Amino acid sequence: MGSLSIWHWIIVLVVVLVLFGGRGKISSLMGDFAQGIKAFKKGMTEDDSAKAEPPANEPAKTIDHQAAPASPQPQAEPRKAS
């Protein structure tokens, strides 16, 4: 139970080769990750600024509201004391 099987050693070897196999692989991977985060943040700020300012060439949109006729609500019957 205390020793690792051959499959454990193979998985450990594959992980080590992937992480440390090539020079600069991790740094390039982290650089790509950082660029993705920066692009995401830039997209979010552009989206927020687009929502904040309505386009100047379009008039403000309005919604016409017509109230529905008032329907009578049924009255609750008083409780009988027993």
Image (cartoon, grey):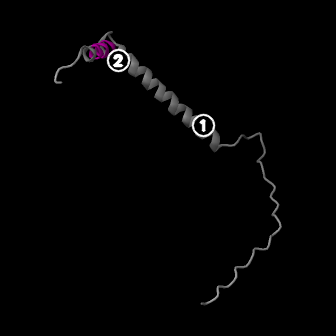
Residue shown at 80% from the left, 70% from the top: 71
Q: Which amino acid does label 2 sit on?
A: Ile
Task: Residue at the far left: name it.
Answer: 2
Q: List x then y, in percent, for residue 38.
A: 48, 29
Sequence-first tag of 1 and 2 = 2
How packed mark 1 is, by other alpha carbons closer than 10 Å (few <14, some 14-19, many 20 or more), is few
- Answer with left or right where residue 59 lies relative to residue 12: right
Q: How many labels does the image show?
A: 2
Residue shown at 23% from the left, 17% from the top: 5
Residue shown at 64% from the left, 88% from the top: 80
Q: Quadrant of the C terminus?
A: bottom right
61 or 65: which is nearer to us?
Answer: 65
Please give the residue where the numbered disc 2 appears in the rendered image: 26
> What label does residue 37 carry, if any?
none
- Answer with left or right where residue 36 lies relative to residue 15: right
Please give the residue where the numbered disc 1 appears in the rendered image: 47
Q: Helix, strand or loop at disc 1?
A: helix
Q: What residue type is labelled 1?
A: Asp
- Mark 1 → mark 2, Cα distance in angstroms: 32 Å
Q: List x then y, in percent, for residue 75.
A: 73, 79
**Image vertical order of residue 54 relative to residue 18, above or below:** below
**Image vertical order of residue 44 relative to residue 13, above or below:** below
**Image vertical order of residue 67 relative to residue 44, above or below:** below
- Answer with left or right where residue 1 lies relative to residue 19: left
Residue 7, picture quadrant? top left
Q: In which quarter of the image is the N terminus?
A: top left
Task: Residue at the far bottom: name it.
Answer: 82
**Image vertical order of residue 9 relative to residue 45, above or below:** above
Q: Give the magenta-colored segment's residue range.
A: 10-18
Q: List x then y, in percent, for residue 47.
A: 60, 37
Eye-nearest disc, 1 or 2: 2
46 or 40: which is nearer to us?
Answer: 40
